[in-house]
Image (cartoon, coloured by chain):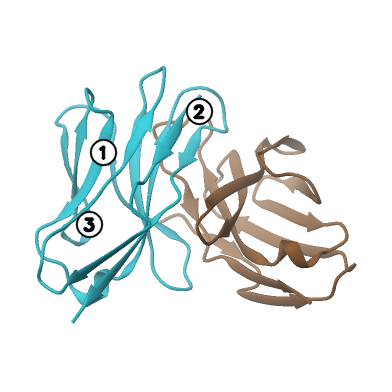
Amino acid sequence: DVKVTQSSRYLVKRTGEKVFLECVQDMDHENMFWYRQDPGLGLRLIYFSYDVKMKEKGDIPEGYSVSREKKERFSLILESASTNQTSMYLCASRPGQGWDQPQHFGDGTRLSIL
Amino acid sequence: AQSVTQLDSQVPVFEEAPVELRCNYSSSVSVYLFWYVQYPNQGLQLLLKYLSGSTLVKGINGFEAEFNKSQTSFHLRKPSVHISDTAEYFCAVSAPTGANNLFFGTGTRLTVIP
């Protein structure tokens, strides 16, 4: 079974802090994704990566950046955290060219910015 | 571009009653369709997927969905729900248009009432 592991289940940070959310997958998947989930809005794509050091902006990239130095690890960075970034963050992975394949999700990180 | 509409944001249903969660999509190309479930404080888990072949797809936990191409729908059904089915359900579509090719609906919260 594919395992996608997010480093923290709950995180509390202060406004202005630089925040790192880490995600690791163990199935050698090329594609990795970061979403945020808010009530009534579903899942919105922040960034995705289709290879090491490759990234593409999703629907809501403002205020975020990402890093993918190794194939198994995809990090989401909040450069200067703000209260409107309080949310649930979900990481997912999927094989490359696997558009008929489902994404595999981690358990999420519930981030609170005070 | 693809889009997904889940018409019902919340669906309350009594235990052992049947339920249908509605999903409609729009796309100019052929798509693959997925239903995911999210239990409280967890990530998303695949319930079922439609790739091709029989339009009636069976998934885990007694759920099934029917693909209707003419109505561009992929409704999820269960003949008799349990308390443990209380969760949020997401419909998603995938198209062969690059790595960013999974589009989610806004979710339906199913609440099973004892």
**Residue furthest bottom in the image:** B114
Residue identified by numbered label 1: B74
Three-letter amino acid code at the position of disc 1 = Phe
Colour brown belongs to chain? A
The residue located at (15%, 59%) in the rendering is B62
- Which residue lies under the disc numbered 2? A97
> Hey, what amino acid is under mark 2?
Gln
What amino acid is found at the position of numbered circle 3 in the picture? Ile
Q: Which residue is mark 3?
A: B60
Give the spatial CA distance, label 2 vs label 1.
24 Å
Q: Is residue A35 above or below residue B82?
A: above
Q: Chain of mark 2?
A: A
Q: State the cyan chain.
A: B
Same chain under badges 3 and 1? The reply is: yes
Question: Seen from this angle, which residue lies furthest top?
Answer: B28
Label 2–label 3 contact, CB within 8 A: no
Distance from Cα at disc 3 to Cα at disc 1: 16 Å
Quarter occupied by residue B24: top left
Quarter residue B55 falls in? top left
Q: What quarter of the picture does the C terminus of chain A occupy? A: bottom right
Residue B23, placed above or below residue A40: above
Q: Secondary structure at mark 3?
A: helix
